[in-house]
Amino acid sequence: MKKLLLIFVLLGSVFFMQKAEAQSFQSALGARLGYPFSASYKTFISDANALELIVGTRGFGSGSNRYRWWQISGAYQIHKPLELEGIEGLEWYFGFGAAIYFWNFDTGFNEPGSNTSFGIQGYLGASYTVPDSPINLTLDWVPTYFLNGFG
């Protein structure tokens, strides 16, 4: 069971499609299984261009040294088919986005506090739509540059 969960975490996100079109689906609601754990909504505005909204959270630490942050981000992505012999439904994509982060922390050294950070993001990933199924698996890399620091 742990191996199966790890596979899904590494895949990044799972989308459940609503409508089939040229890119296999028009809009999708999904879960991004990584850091942060997030809910996402992706919609295609053309055959190759998509917008994605992501809301997520991550917490770590224990006792008097705890952090929790919430993220709201939006992305513009460009999808391209990936031609591999015998594999249908495979694409790669790239794009950019922006995010806002809300931090809460208690370090044990100072009074508990909070902070807000802003980030710009890049997106690079691969997407696979399972044939004859409403399932899309995605693995992506989202490097983030924090404009005003983090935490």
Image (tube, grey):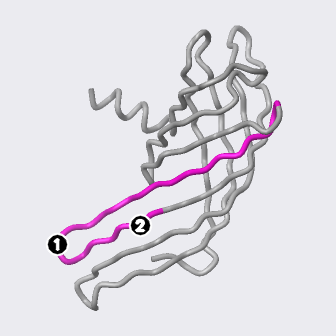
Residue type, label 1: Gly
Query: What secondary structure is the stretch in magenta mostly built from?
Result: strand
Segment tinted magenta in the rendering? 47-70
Residue 128 horizontal/vertical position (percent): 62, 24
Q: Are marks 2 and 1 in contact (CB under 8 Å)?
A: no
Which structural element holds mark 1?
A: loop
* Residue shown at the point (82%, 30%) measured from the top left: 47
Residue 83 horizontal/vertical position (percent): 78, 19
| Residue farthest toward the bottom in the current orientation of the protein | 110
* Residue shown at the point (72%, 33%) measured from the top left: 92
Q: Quadrant of the C terminus?
A: bottom left
Residue type, label 2: Trp
Q: Is residue 96 magenta?
A: no
Numbered badge on residue 69: 2
Q: Is residue 65 magenta?
A: yes
Q: Residues within 10 Å of mark 2 (few under 14, many from 20)?
A: many
Alpha-carbon distance for marks 2 and 1?
A: 17 Å
Tell me if 69 is positioned left or right of 26 in this view.
left
Which structural element holds mark 2?
A: strand
